[in-house]
Amino acid sequence: MKVAVTGSTGFLGTALMANLRADGHEILRLVRRPPQAADEVRWDPRAADAGLGDPEPLHGIDACVHLAGAGVANRRWTARYKAEVKASRVLGTRALAGVLAKLVPQPRVFVCASAIGWYGENSGVDETAPAGQGFLAGLVREWEAAADPARDAGIRVVHTRSGLVMGRDGGILPRFAPLARFGVCPGLGPGTQVMSWISKSDEIAAIRFVLDREDLSGPVNLTAPEPATNAEFTAALNAAMGRPYLPWLRVPAWLLRLAIGEASVELLTSSRVTPRRLLETGYEFRHPAIREALPAELARP
Ligand SMILES: NC(=O)c1ccc[n+]([C@@H]2O[C@H](COP(=O)([O-])OP(=O)(O)OC[C@H]3O[C@@H](n4cnc5c(N)ncnc54)[C@H](OP(=O)(O)O)[C@@H]3O)[C@@H](O)[C@H]2O)c1
């Protein structure tokens, strides 16, 4: 299979590329800088034609996995940065979807990264739930809709609504693991808020699963079947480091809001997201529970 990948330099893109290559698949990397290798093509997420005036290099791709976008948790959410995050995701997806729609033959599938931010605060949802409230929910709604040109052209489009991905080299784990190593990893806010998470191994395996499953299209939640409260996550991380969990060691919600502003909603919002479609289609989770996921991921090379 020949797979075009955007965001291939990122946390998930790097792992996905290695995983696909290990199984003999061919990768075409869409990069924003000048290409440096034969398997790279330059694209511009802000250009209407994705900067791919002549999409010749994309001819013959079987699939496209679109992971690119300015980081949601990387910076303070100023009005300017919010606009940048939104533009990078909505414009890039729309442009890419338009290019894929015109390819002959068309790719079989367009897998677009998405996020459980779609649901906003909730006490239990699956893929049938409507979009929630707030900046993230609005962003994800527009980001998913931007894939319409590919959908309208008859391409199978999958939106992988990922939870917090647990891997040692990206996402939230490297921020808290060093604190846990020294026995000072705090809980956040009340600690009762539910975090829907997925191990990096499952994230990559689930992307491979949706690439192959012709019967899956639309939103697919990439979350472990056993969500954890923030207190359970903190206890599991401390245990993975051989440290005791100190329930009194907490960063109050107000202090977190003061320190990182509106971006704190990612850590304080309670969201219990069920991976209903993965379970219904027979995906088998490698790490269903946080207590065994964290040591396994922290031990990976
Ligand atoms: N990690 C998680 O916990 C998580 C959870 C839910 C959803 N997701 C989503 O999954 C996707 C991949 O996540 P990730 O953790 O691998 O992200 P990441 O490490 O931040 O990588 C994203 C990639 O996007 C490209 N990029 C950066 N800024 C950009 C901009 N302004 N415009 C366009 N492209 C830009 C970069 O690749 P190039 O330099 O190669 O272009 C970057 O490596 C993202 O869309 C993310 O929102 C991740």
Image: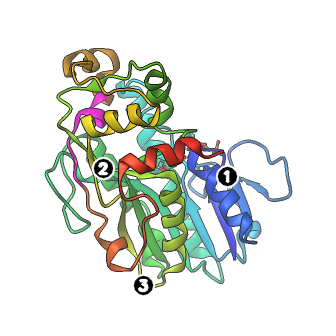
Q: How many marks?
A: 3
Query: Is 22 on the left-hand or right-hand side of 288?
Result: right
Q: Which residue is drawn at 63% across and 53% down?
A: 15
Residue type indicated by callout 1: Trp
Residue type indicated by callout 3: Asp
Residue placed under numbered mark 3 in the picture: 215
Q: Point out the frontmost of discs 2 and 1.
A: 2
How far apart are labels 3 and 1 at the CA level? 30 Å
Is disc 2 in contact with disc 1, using a CB cutoff of under 8 Å?
A: no
Q: x%, y% of residue 143? A: 39, 54
Is disc 3 in contact with disc 1, using a CB cutoff of under 8 Å?
A: no
Residue placed under numbered mark 2 in the picture: 196
Q: x%, y% of residue 172? A: 44, 35
Q: Point out the frontmost of discs 3 and 2.
A: 2
Picture quarter containing residue 64?
Answer: bottom right
Ligand 1 within 8 Å of the CB at mark 2: no
**Residue 38 vertical position relative to residue 61 in the rendered view, above or below:** above
Q: In the rendered image, is residue 203 in sight? A: yes
Q: In which quarter of the image is the N terminus?
A: bottom right
Tag of residue 43: 1
Q: Sequence order check: which comes first, mark 3 or mark 1?
A: 1
Which stretch did the figure color magenta?
264-272
**Residue 233 vertical position relative to residue 60 in the rendered view, above or below:** above
Q: Quadrant of the C terminus?
A: top right
Q: Which residue is drawn at 66% across and 82% down?
A: 104
Q: Sequence order check: which comes first, mark 3 or mark 2?
A: 2
Q: x%, y% of residue 109? A: 54, 75
